[in-house]
Amino acid sequence: MQIYDSIIIGSGIAGMTGSLYLKRENKNILLIEKEMPGGQMVKTPAIENYPGFVKIEGSTLALSIYEQIKNLKVETLFEEVIDIKEEKQNYEVKTNKNVYKTKTILLATGREPRKLGLPKENELLGKGISYCATCDGAFFKGKEVAIVGGASTAVTEALFLSEICKKVYVLYRKDNLRSEDILKEKLYKKENVEILYETSIKEIKEEKGKLKSIITDKNREIKIEGLFIFIGYEPKSTFLKNIVSLNNDGYILVNKKMETSKKGIYACGDSIQKEVYQLTTATSEGTIAAISIKNYLLETE
């Protein structure tokens, strides 16, 4: 069995950036992705704060970076990593299909949407409930929908839905949206958007296996056909809890070199504990992690 110089787990913008830098250093690397290249970026309808682009779709940017990966002939597998084991001076990465050996690991596993935790939420996923307006919004063209959340992601998705839906309710538990000002101003101008502040959902109602309405904590029933939930994210780190140090919320702890608590294992992107979660910071962290891995390999040869 061959031993890779590094295995990158996750192909969001951080993981792909790390892969680019390592491959350009002629390292023998393997990129493993569970779903599709791009991570959360793919689900973003419009990116307006990434240098070099006035405006670009997340999926377009993701595809462009992935083309760079393919042009460099980075070996890529679409499998789910389920365990990591230390083996002498190397590591064994186990997926749902195979086992691979490597000298170092770069964790770029990202985050996934947080759920409301209400009854019927899981049951109605794909039957009225969604965590991605870009992915599923077209199914609700001309219909009435609701969004839960008030940060930039929620407001961005509300703007997207306002262009195709008859009515968009935005429910937020606080008294003021906390997205970027430019996004808020755009939303305020939408005549088919109603913002309900200091409001939460206490019950989800269904009819014949599909979403029928929501009941707010103020006992208001709102009849909708689509409910989109954007209340934050949780790191995809369940399989890492016995491998590297995590904080109480499950985020990976790293130092300024992107080193984890385990020698030879690095992390970057949305899965690490940090102050700012943006595409630009993820790109930077992927770069730093790759250079740190390169130096580590030189020191341990």
Image (cartoon, helix red, strand yellow):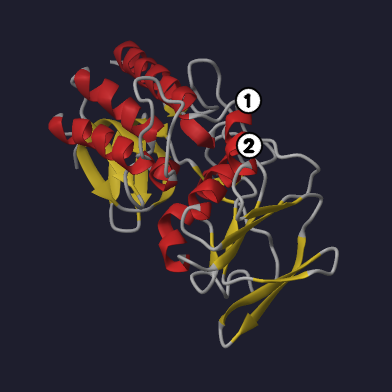
Q: Position of residue 298 (x, y in %)?
A: 30, 12
- Can residue 189 be seen here? yes
Of residues 96 and 58, which is closer to you in this image?
58
In the rendered image, which quarter contains the N terminus? top left
Q: What residue type is labelled 2?
A: Lys
Look at the picture and state if 103 lies above or below 99.
above
* Direction from residue 278 to residue 296 in the image, left or right: left
Residue at x-position 25% and y-position 47%: 77
Q: Give the residue number, with chain letter if any, for mark 1.
A: 275
Look at the picture and state if 156 lies above or below 263.
below
Q: Give the residue number, with chain letter if any, for mark 2.
A: 184
- Nearer the observer: mark 1 or 2; the answer is 2
* Direction from residue 55 to residue 270 in the image, left or right: right
What is the quadrant of residue 121 in the picture?
A: bottom right
Farthest-out residue, bottom: 208
Farthest-out residue, right: 218
How many numbered marks, from 0 up? 2
Residue neighbourhood size for the residue with mark 2, other residues' Cα within 10 Å, grouped as few (<14), some (14–19), many (≥20): some
- Can residue 10 be seen here? no
Q: What residue type is labelled 1?
A: Glu
Counting residues from the N terminus, which is met first, the one under dot 1 or under dot 2? 2
Q: Position of residue 294 (x, y in %)?
A: 32, 16
Residue at x-position 41% and y-position 17%: 288
Of residues 137 and 2, which is closer to you in this image?
137
* Direction from residue 266 to residue 168 in the image, left or right: right
Residue at x-position 65% and y-position 49%: 231
Q: What element carries label 1?
A: loop
